[in-house]
Amino acid sequence: MVWRFDPRSGELTALTDPTMVPNPNGLAFSPKGDKLYVVNTSPIINGTLPPKYKRPASIYEFDVVNEGGIERLANRRLFAWPWTGIGDGIKVDTQGNVYAGTSDGVQVWSKHGEQILKVFIPETGAVNLVFANEGRLVVTAEEKVYLIQLDPSVRGPPLWEYPRDANEEK
């Protein structure tokens, strides 16, 4: 399940159940924090390999809504799915494009779910990724690290600008 932890109160709240996302893995917020992308790795159950490809591997998009000061997820919808295999780590750039590590590399979708880029990574694909300065994307694989040069204008949100509590001062 996807959980929300409130560090102030210590409260832990389930935001999804197994019927919504059977095996949640990577999580990433949109630049405004109003959407949450969740990678579903249900072909791999409890780490068992080989994957059971009859199960869906997909990326879901949820609206993040605030009702009476309580944040929750609403309106689950299929956002995208990897061409091959299973999605893993996920990030969103400042323009709202969604990047996911997959079994054969990195796939990128626009904020509307249209595929705009596919980078093949040899052997094991991509496990996770992170934005670096000047349009660089650092990608980890099982045993290697790759540096992908994108357009220099591509940026990931700085950590201090990730979605935050509306009552918290900047």
Image (spheres, rainbow, N blue to C red):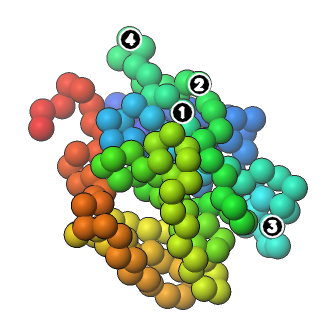
Residue holding disc 1: 62
Looking at the image, the residue that sits furthest to the top is 68
Asked if disc 2 and disc 1 are in contact, CB closer than 8 Å, the reply is: yes
Q: Residues within 10 Å of mark 4 (few under 14, many from 20)?
A: few
How many marks the image carries: the answer is 4
Q: Residues within 10 Å of mark 3 (few under 14, many from 20)?
A: some
Question: What is the CA distance from the residue labelled 4 to the residue labelled 1?
Answer: 19 Å
Q: Quadrant of residue 31 in the image?
A: top left
Residue holding disc 3: 51
Q: Residue 7: x percent and y percent?
A: 33, 39
Looking at the image, the residue that sits furthest to the left is 170
Q: Quadrant of residue 87 in the image?
A: bottom right
Secondary structure at badge 4 equals loop
Q: Amino acid at mark 2?
A: Asn
Asked if disc 4 and disc 2 are in contact, CB closer than 8 Å, the reply is: no
- Residue name at image x 20 percent, y 25 percent: 167
Q: Amino acid at mark 1?
A: Phe
Return the disc, 2 or 1, that comes first in the chain's sequence: 1
Q: Amino acid at mark 3?
A: Pro
Residue holding disc 2: 75
Q: Amino acid at mark 4?
A: Gly
Q: Nearer the viewer, mark 4 or mark 3?
A: 3
Question: What is the CA distance from the residue labelled 2 to the residue labelled 1?
Answer: 6 Å
Return the disc, 4 or 2, that comes first in the chain's sequence: 4
Residue holding disc 4: 68
Q: Residue 129: x percent and y percent?
A: 44, 68
Q: Nearer the viewer, mark 3 or mark 2?
A: 2
